[in-house]
Structure formats: structure tokens, C-alpha cells
Image (spheres, rainbow, N blue to C red):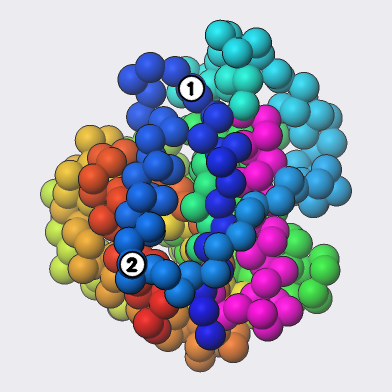
Amino acid sequence: MSVLLLTHRACLHHDPGPHHPECPDRLRAVLTALDAGEFAELIRDQAPLATVDQLTRVHPENYVAAILAIRPEPDERVPLDGDTIMSWGSAEAALRSAGAAVAAVDAVMKGEFRRAFCATRPPGHHCEVARPMGFCLFANAAVAARHAQAEYGAKRVAVVDFDVHHGNGTQACFETDASLFYASSHQWPLYPGTGDVTEHGVGNILNVTLPPGADGAAFRAVWADQIIPAVEAFDPDLLIVSAGFDAHAADPLAQLRVREPDFAWLTEALCALADRCCEGRLVSLLEGGYDLDALGRSAAAHVRALMRA
């Protein structure tokens, strides 16, 4: 069964400004890599707009309204914090990014696809329930998880996160609800300063830290020995992946030494986990990755593994 690729050109119109690492060229790098002939069998579709009802399963209505009301002029930008900035196209891009996550859940829960990859931006795993941060405006993975529960009766949904930064937003959205599970590997110490191994939620949070300089072998070990067994024990009905590629050795925002074969290995392992737990249902969402060449190669390795696993 083919893999679904969801994206939208509106995600290129979110422009935080010159020299900002979360730039439109990130998405261009991913899509250029996925234009190679080996990806011809991907089924490509346009990311829809998330609805307010879908977003308010996670975020308060007044928060959603406030974000969507920020519509700067084409030559203006509105900073929400030191890192998170909105331009004229940001609101629609954020709706498309969350909407892609919802549409991917629809596709795998209906059995139309076993795997889906959302090549969209802005990312989402730093956005808390009512606080944008870390380049993120809506908590895309959490919105996807709540959609699976509300529309398809999923009893348990797991999000696994291999971005080099801890997904404090996803954790904050999940940590009091035992029907949701969040597991993350991330560099420690590093932004945003959360994700200590002592943070367990209600027994549904697993944080595994890696020191600066940790390589692909260490990365593989924490997933094989700790995270994958824990997710398997949780036995989710759906597996959502926060796929950040900034643990790559070339990335400028962190100091891990993961490479493309490590991302491919982990993707294959997560597909096998989904096959064992949830009839293969896996939704992957693009998060970080800030060296453009490394990002393109790593996303290609990830999607290649989704297609063959």
C-alpha cells in the first residue's frame, strides 16, 4: 500500500524573517528531495485547513481565535516571543499544518493508507495548550491524537518524538491523560529546558536524554532498549511520529551526531512497531531540521523507509 504525502504551498508563506532558522527553504529542501524518481509512487495530496473545532480539542477557543486574528501586512511581522514570529501567511500555514495532521489520521484510520507523512510547516511540538513557542503555533501532533479519539474511537494514541529538542508542548497537552502516551529522545541540556527523565506525567510520559556529542549508536540504543518497548507496552491504536531531523550531525542548533542511516533505521523500527500494535497505522509529522542539505537527505531517508517497511 502506498504512502500518503500531504503538503501545501501555503506552508511556504509563513516567513519569520531573514536569517530565521525555521525558514520556507526548509520545506523546499524536503519537497525537492521527495521529487526524486524513487518517490514517484508516493500519493500526493493537498493539506486541508484545520477547523476551529479540531483545534479546540486541544487549545482554548480564545487562543485559537487570537492566533488566527494575527494577519500582518505583507511587509510586516508580529513576534509572539523571541523565536516565534508570524507573517502575513502564517495563520493559513498553521491551519494547513494542523489540517495535514488531521487528514493523515483520517487516511490511516479509514484504512486508505498505512503510513502518511506531512511535509508542512510551522512545526508543532513546542506549542503548549495556550502558549505558542519554539517556532510553533498549534500543537499538531496533539490535534491529530485528539482527532483520532474523537472521530474514530481510538482508546490509546502514542506520539513518539525524535527531534533533538524536547517536545514540551506535546508533553503539556498529554501529561494528565492516561489515554495518551508521549515518548521523546532529545539532547540534554538544550532548549526548551524541559524533558528531564523525572517527568512522567501520570505514567504516560517517557523522556530519554542524550548528551551533546552522542552518536547514532547511542541514539539507536535508547530507542531499541527503552522507548520502543515502552510504546509497545502501551499498545496504541495509532502511532504518531514527531519527525525532527535536527539531531543530524550537520545541524547548527544542536550537538548530536545522528545521520541518515540512523533515521532510516528508526523509521523501519517504528513501522514494525506500528505493525505489531496498531495494524500498521503510522502518521509522521515534520518538526525540526535546520541544515537544509541534511534535512532534505534525512527526510528522504525517512520517507524511503516508510515506503519499504
Label 1, label 2: how many angstroms apart (C-alpha)? 32 Å
Residue 17 versus residue 221 in the image, above or below: above
To which quarter of the image does residue 77 belong? top right
Left or right of 77, for residue 91: right
> In this figure, which residue is indicated by the disc labeled 1?
16
Disc number lying in front (1 or 2): 2
Residue that appears at 32% across and 61% down: 36
Mark 1 Cα within 10 Å, few/some/many (few <14, many 20+)? many
Query: Magenta segment, principal secondary structure?
Result: helix
Q: Amino acid at mark 2?
A: Gly
Residue 268 versus residue 263 in the image, above or below: below
Q: Which region shows up in magenta?
A: 90-116
To which quarter of the image does residue 87 belong? top right
Q: Nearer the viewer, residue 107 or 64?
A: 107
Residue 224 versus residue 255 in the image, above or below: below
Label for residue 37?
2
> Can residue 29 be seen here?
yes
> Can residue 124 be seen here?
no
Residue that appears at 80% across and 76% down: 153
Q: Give x and y (percent) for residue 298.
A: 29, 57
Left or right of 183, for residue 254: left
Left or right of 13, for residue 58: right
Residue 134 versus residue 200 in the image, above or below: above
Q: Give x and y (percent) for residue 173.
A: 65, 50
